[in-house]
Image (tube, grey):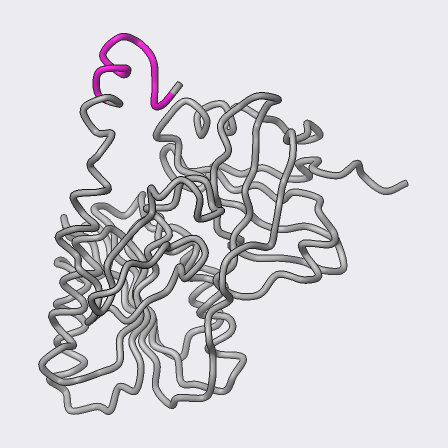
Amino acid sequence: MLPELYTILSKTVIAPRVTRFDVYVPEIARKRRAGQFVIIRVWEGGERIPLTIADADPQAGTITLISQSVGKTTRLLAEKQIGEKLQDVVGPLGTATHIEKWGTVVCIGGGIGAAPLHPIAQAVKGAGNYLITILGARTRELIILEKEIRAISDEIIITTDDGSYGDKGLVTESLQKLIDSGRTLDKIITIGPAIMMKMVAETTRPFQIPTLASLNSIMVDGTGMCGGCRVTVAGQVKFVCVDGPEFDAHQVEWSEMMLRLNTFKEYECRLSANGKEGRE
């Protein structure tokens, strides 16, 4: 007997406040492509949140979602148990990542950014590229999906801010070493905190290495209607959820994007101080 739609078939805590779910949605599992996302609701009348499809198993009919508990909705999602259902799952949404055989590709993931990076790295390797992956986080316990990404990478570099695992330092330092070694790097793909992606772009800009950044962290409703994910790219207004989520990192107005990311920071801090987490 098949599970009901939106049933959680597995759940694993993979890092502090980071949970991995496999959810039964066979049509999405069959149709999804690297870089696409879904919109979920945890309960009826609840907030709609976008989550990138971190992996999929078309035969089992499942997609993998990875969520970091930062607000009310993601906290309640983390409390869901195996066998329980999500209210609904809509997708796949967003423009799939353009993948081709470029040559040597460096995929760079920061913290939770390893989740949306994983399917893109899979597709990059599947297209016949030589894949170098750099994963970075503040500490060892915040490195996620290392085993899965190591399995598909020709080379992998781990960095931590505090030196508790891998190389001590930032992902951009490891990237600079690769550039300085004289190796030909044909494409850079980066996903993580906005400041990290900005610094990756500034590292590659002098060498004119094509660099793609995923701005999925700024998405809100995933339909292009709320305007919350509005960014400027090459002087033009774009909406991350419908025009992206990937853009030329050298053309993104990073300062504007980071200001937009902080729009609700004061409000969320006030709710947290009152004993509530995140947006209501």
Image vertical order of residue 196 relative to residue 104, above or below: above
**Residue 41 image point, x, y percent:** 57, 31
Horizontally, is 66 left or right of 248 in the view? right
Image vertical order of residue 20 relative to residue 277, above or below: below
Q: Residue at x 49, y 27 (%)?
A: 47
- Count the marks: how many? 0
**Residue 106 image point, x, y percent:** 31, 76
**Residue 271 image point, x, y percent:** 28, 15
Dividing the picture into quadrants, the one containing residue 55 is bottom right
Quadrant of the image for the C terminus? top left
Q: In the image, which residues are magenta?
A: 269-279
252, 129: nearer the viewer: 252
227, 249: nearer the viewer: 227
Horizontally, is 280 left or right of 138 in the view? right
Image vertical order of residue 163 relative to residue 204, above or below: above
Dividing the picture into quadrants, the one containing residue 254 is bottom left
Q: Is residue 160 magenta?
A: no
Q: Residue at x 27, y 54 (%)?
A: 231
**Residue 83 image point, x, y percent:** 71, 30
Horizontally, is 118 left or right of 158 in the view? right
Q: Is residue 276 magenta?
A: yes
Q: Residue at x 48, y 62 (%)?
A: 35
Q: Residue at x 39, y 31 (%)?
A: 69
Quadrant of the image for the N terminus? top right
Q: In the current view of this chain or complex, which residue is farthest to the top? A: 274
Q: In the current view of this chain or complex, which residue is farthest to the right? A: 1
